Image: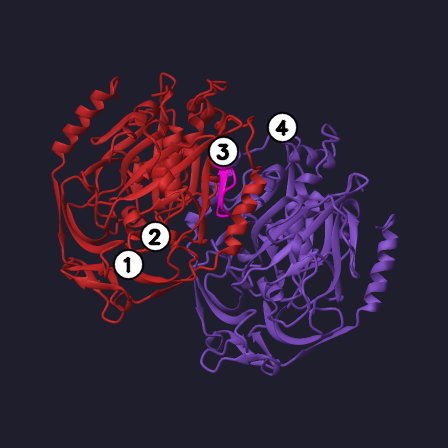
Chain colours: A purple, B red
Amino acid sequence: MFSEIAEFHAWYRERCRAQDYRTSKIPIDEIDGWLTDPDSGNLVHRTGRFFTVEGLDVTRSGRAVESWQQPILVQPERGVLGILVREFDGVPHCLLQVKMEPGNVNGLQMSPTVQATRSNFTGVHGGKPVPYLEYFTAPRRGRILSDVLQSEQASWFLAKRNRNMIVQVDEDVPVLDDFCWLSFEQIDELLREPNLVNMDTRTVLAGAASQRFRPTDLTADTFRGAMARSWSPGEGALHATVELLSWFTEAKSRCTLTRERMPLAKLSGWSRVDGELVHDRGQHFAVVGVDVRASHREVTGWQQPMFQPRSQGVIGFLTRRIDGVLHLLMQARTETGALDSVEMAPTVQCQPDNYRLLPDDRRPLFLDELLGAPPERVRFDCVHSEEGGRFYHAENRYLLVEVADTFPMEVPQDFAWVTLRQLTEFVRYGNHLNVEARSLLTFFGFYKEDER
Amino acid sequence: MFSEIAEFHAWYRERCRAQDYRTSKIPIDEIDGWLTDPDSGNLVHRTGRFFTVEGLDVTRSGRAVESWQQPILVQPERGVLGILVREFDGVPHCLLQVKMEPGNVNGLQMSPTVQATRSNFTGVHGGKPVPYLEYFTAPRRGRILSDVLQSEQASWFLAKRNRNMIVQVDEDVPVLDDFCWLSFEQIDELLREPNLVNMDTRTVLAGAASQRFRPTDLTADTFRGAMARSWSPGEGALHATVELLSWFTEAKSRCTLTRERMPLAKLSGWSRVDGELVHDRGQHFAVVGVDVRASHREVTGWQQPMFQPRSQGVIGFLTRRIDGVLHLLMQARTETGALDSVEMAPTVQCQPDNYRLLPDDRRPLFLDELLGAPPERVRFDCVHSEEGGRFYHAENRYLLVEVADTFPMEVPQDFAWVTLRQLTEFVRYGNHLNVEARSLLTFFGFYKEDER
């Protein structure tokens, strides 16, 4: 444990030095262990396991572009993302690990206690056993705080879900190299640093966000006070939960999205250039090959395909006090790869560069309000990475902005004002909050007690 | 409105006389408007709309039979099942309609206010407009009591869902022929009559079950008292809701079910005999053709394929008082066609005849306890029909049995004890309670106040 956050940073730097790794990009047709299927052009592992890169034909999306084709990651097997919690002197701490992922811009980030695909724990890699896995598989000791199948980036994955778990134990837990206990307050500080707390940790912690709430400041006329009231069961929400669920059902009823898997080689608008599969206008993302050498992973070296976004994304909530209670402007978003096609998403979630060549009226709603907010209204602003195991240098700017009371209460039909309390109900059930919204919920949950 | 239930029955008999219809079975290759696809043998409507009958290959089910092939109904489009509620003298009433469905054993049953596929309301039939639909489509007047996409019979449908809605209005509503207002108490009486309240009404009313609870008798040492405590938020549940959600997630993680659509003509174990597609051992169900002549439907006559079960099913909950609070023994069941493969189901849900040729150790768990319960422990016992628009004479015996205190609390891993209060949380979210469990929840919700 660290009594000061500076101690963590010293430990983190030391672990970075100790972990010897390097990654480099290689042509996708030279990825060791991966084959291009001669018929479809799909990228498949020689064992048929892990994941595949296939094509997806999307029509009637109802989004800024109605129809398109794109590569998609298909990974039917589900992994476990698990965080172990234990109290020390009455203060809950999470066991996190510093872990190298090939797609990380900075190599090592703080991961959950367990971050393992089924291939990991059934030994397909031929690697080492997954430490701490026994705390997350039945029969378990410990108390379940959260356990739900949650979706992942639906722009790049087809119906991918992982099991998100938080388990609290009272017993002593041996702490292996590369692992450390961090208090919720310490994690809160780390969440304000770019690219340090990885996506898997953020999505799992969304399941603990409500437990972070302590009913102080319920009367304060501050952002923090409005947030406290938004967590509180007793305070007024603009819409009853049944109305929000109806709004969500209605959005699913409106959704006309159809999607069909198709051969990667047949994709229109995508070409193989210099060993990558790229979009013809240089937008969206590319499929690239990556070579990894590492000393601390289950295996010491491998090669794999990854998705590399062409530009930084923007993900954020507009928030507004309504009768003193903080409300978030939630979007019911048609999600390309989501199991149920529509999920609850942040107000804005896009790569602005993808809209550069489109007419102004296709520009994402509320993007300008989010990016143009005056500094005194920006409550959170930090760049974080998406999953470094599948995405290469995928950075998003995460924002929480509080709009003025003059901001209209009336919003377009795909949007609704919700409280934090309502979000913590939805996050208990899978297929409701998308991964981007869950990351932002974690930032709220771990939001520092004092105003900055 | 009816002041006595006898008045309803007189009205119902009169409506039955007024509705002129007949149904008869015809060979499946002679169904007017339907084609057998020359390549696959699938049954498809000439417009490509409505639904198709295709083949499904099921493997690694983890059920009594590990792998099989079967016909399956594929109906991607979602309909609306909606019930309009209005208070008269402070007493809520539901607007139900007496409706002919070709599969009903007795022709007419009590249906929701609106029971319409998208083809119905977009006019593909070329039929009459759907009355009262405007109360259920945006922009709506009225107050939403329930609105959720719910699954239907996953043994026969692939990922079929309908939107289940209850909308309450204060305004006057014109009552058309074949429609009537029934109070919850009157519906309670009708639920005790065989084959009178149709499946669509039962599943929609599950969304209102919790609103039926009135906190009387919270201390009574009776089944009714134990039920009242089971509805009540303040009373103890054996498992916290987060534990039940974890149990459900765990069951999904164990599930290995794979299913692939396949040509109907290629199914192993099924043959065309006498104009029907039948299972080679005469079990499960048959695909049959039905000719319908009716005066009161959107169109006056049509033909269609239907599924006809070969035997009556049994669907029931074992219930048990735990510290005085009624708990239901819920099953996390691998469901052939369910979107997410596992749903929460009643303790027992099967056609016993399908197990006749299997070894005793494959017999469904708890079937004998359910069927062998002494009469004084049977709290509900009534035969009801499944959807008469797709299923021909599909009857199930619905049972609620209260077991003795000597019944073990420890249950196999696919089972868990849950309270009614917990069920009413799960029913708000789609893909949790299956249609059979929702029917039983409605029986609980509308359970008569007094002990019988």
On the same chain, marks 3 and 2? The answer is yes
| Amino acid type of the residue tagged 4 in the rendering | Gly
| Amino acid type of the residue tagged 1 in the rendering | Thr
Image depth: mark 1 or mark 3 in front: 3
- From the image, give the main secondary structure of the stretch colored magenta: loop
The chain to which mark 1 is attached is: B
The chain to which mark 3 is attached is: B
Residue in the image at 38% along x and 33% along y: B401
Q: Are marks 4 and 3 in contact (CB under 8 Å)?
A: no
Q: Are marks 4 and 1 in contact (CB under 8 Å)?
A: no
The chain to which mark 2 is attached is: B
- Residue that label 1 marks: B52
- Residue that label 4 marks: A234
Q: Is residue B411 covered in magenta?
A: yes
Instruction: Identify the image quadrant of residue B37.
Output: bottom left
The residue stretch that appears in magenta? B408-420
Q: Secondary structure at mark 4?
A: loop
Residue B419, labelled with which disc? 3
Q: Secondary structure at mark 2?
A: loop
Q: Nearer the viewer, residue A62 or A435?
A: A435
Q: Is residue A288 visible?
A: yes
On the same chain, marks 4 and 2? The answer is no
Q: Secondary structure at mark 1?
A: strand
Q: Are marks 4 and 2 in contact (CB under 8 Å)?
A: no
Q: CA distance from mark 2 to mark 1?
A: 15 Å
Q: CA distance from mark 3 to mark 2?
A: 26 Å
Q: Is A178 situated above or below A3?
A: below
Q: Is residue B319 covered in magenta?
A: no
